Amino acid sequence: MDVQLSPSFFGCMDAKSLGPARMFFQSAVSGEFSRSITLRLCGSEVQCFALRAGEDIATIAVPVSQNAAAFADAAAAAGGEEPFRTLAQAIRGTDSSYDLWDELGRLNNELVTSQRELARTVAELQRLNAYKNELLGVAAHDLRNPLSANLAFIDFLLEEADQFNDQQVHLLSRLRNNGSFMLRLVDDVLTFSAVEAGVVRINAESTHLSHVAASVVDTMRIVGERRHIDIDLEMQDPLPPLMLDQVKITQAVQNLVANAVKYSPTGATVTVRVYREEQWLVVDVEDRGPGIPAEELSQLFKPFTRLSTALATTERSVGLGLSITKRLIEAHGGRIAVESVVGRGSKFGVLLPVPELHAGGVS
C-alpha cells in the first residue's frame, strides 16, 4: 500500500524530509515500529515514532531537544486508545534511560571532562619528562669533569708503568677501562638529554659523507685490531657533498661501527659501504655478529634497551647508543634502517637525503 501524505502535512515539512517521511510511514503501514527518523517540520527537527494497530497508525513527533519520556506519557494518556498506549510502551522500550537526549548530553559532558583530564595528564607528563631530562643533563655534566680528571691521572701513572709491578699495572688498566666506560656513559646521557629536550643544534656545513666514513673506519680499526677484527671500507665515487653537522654525523656512524665491532666474533670482518641510492646517500655497516631476533627489532631504538643477544655477551652498555644515533640521523632529515638474521649478522643503514640541485646542477 502506497503512503499518501496530506497537503497540510506536506505544507509544514521541509522539502528534503519528504522522501524520508514517505519511507518512514510506509514502514509503519507494513507493521514495523520505527523511531529512527528525524524530520524537519516547520523549521524544527523532530523525532518521529509510528506504530500500526489494525487499520490505524498511531504516530507522535518528539522535539529532539526535549524529553522523550514526557511524550510517551502524553501518548499513553491520549484518549485511552490502545494504539497510543502501545506506542507509549514502544517509546519507553526503545529508550532505557527514559530520556535519550539527557543521556546523550551526559555522555558528551563525560567525554569533554575526560578530554580535559587527559590534556592535564599529558601536560603534567611533559613537565615531568622535561624535568627528568634537565636533571639527567645536570648530573651528567657535573660528573664529566671529575671523571675526565681521574682518567688523566691514571694515564699519567700508566706512563710510569716501569715503576710498578705487574699487579699494580693490571689494576691501573682496570681503572682506566672502567673510567672510560663511565665517561662514555656520561657522554651518552648528556647527548640523550639534549636530544630529548629538543636542544640539539645542527651546525650544518658542506660535508663529504665518504670522508666521515673513512675517518670513522681509521679510528675504529685500532679498536678492531685488538680483537683481530678487520674493518673494510667500500666507497662509491664520486658522491655529492651534503649540508651536515659533521661532528654529529660522525658520532652516529661511529656508534654503528663500534657496535658492529663490539658484537662481532674474533676474526670476523665488519664492512662499511658508502654509496648513492636514488635520492639518498647511504652508509651501510654490516657485521657477522649474533644477529637480532625479529620479535626484538621493534625495541631496537628505544632508550635503555638491551637485547637478548647483547645480554649474552660480556660487553657493557646501557642501551643509549642506537637511540641517540636514530635521533641524530632524524635531526638531519634522514632515517635509519636495519636488516638482521639470527646467527648471520646485522646490517644497519644510515640514509641521508640528497637535495635536488637546479640551475644547471645535478639532481
Image: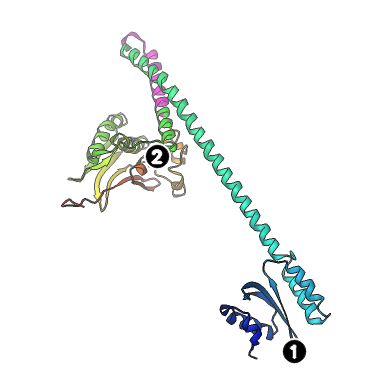
Q: Which residues are magenta?
A: 162-184
Disc 2 marks a residue whose amino acid type is Leu
Q: Which mark is residue 278?
A: none
**Residue nearer the viewer, 78 or 155:** 78
In the image, farthest residue toward the left = 360
**Residue nearer the viewer, 264 or 349:** 349
Give the side of residue 54 with respect to residue 42, left or right: right
Which x, y percent locates residue 15?
56, 80
Circle 2 residues within 10 Å: few <14, some 14–19, many ≥20: many
Asked if residue 181 is among those painted magenta in the image, a careful observer would answer yes
Find disc 2 in the rendering and name its residue.
322
Residue found 69% across the figure and 81% down from its top: 32
Find disc 1 in the rendering and name its residue.
55
Disc 1 marks a residue whose amino acid type is Glu
Residue found 60% across the figure and 48% down from its top: 116
Our reading of the magenta stretch's main secondary structure is helix
Circle 1 residues within 10 Å: few <14, some 14–19, many ≥20: few
Q: Earlier in the sequence, mark 2 or mark 1?
A: 1
**Residue nearer the viewer, 288 or 139:** 139
Secondary structure, mark 2, is: helix
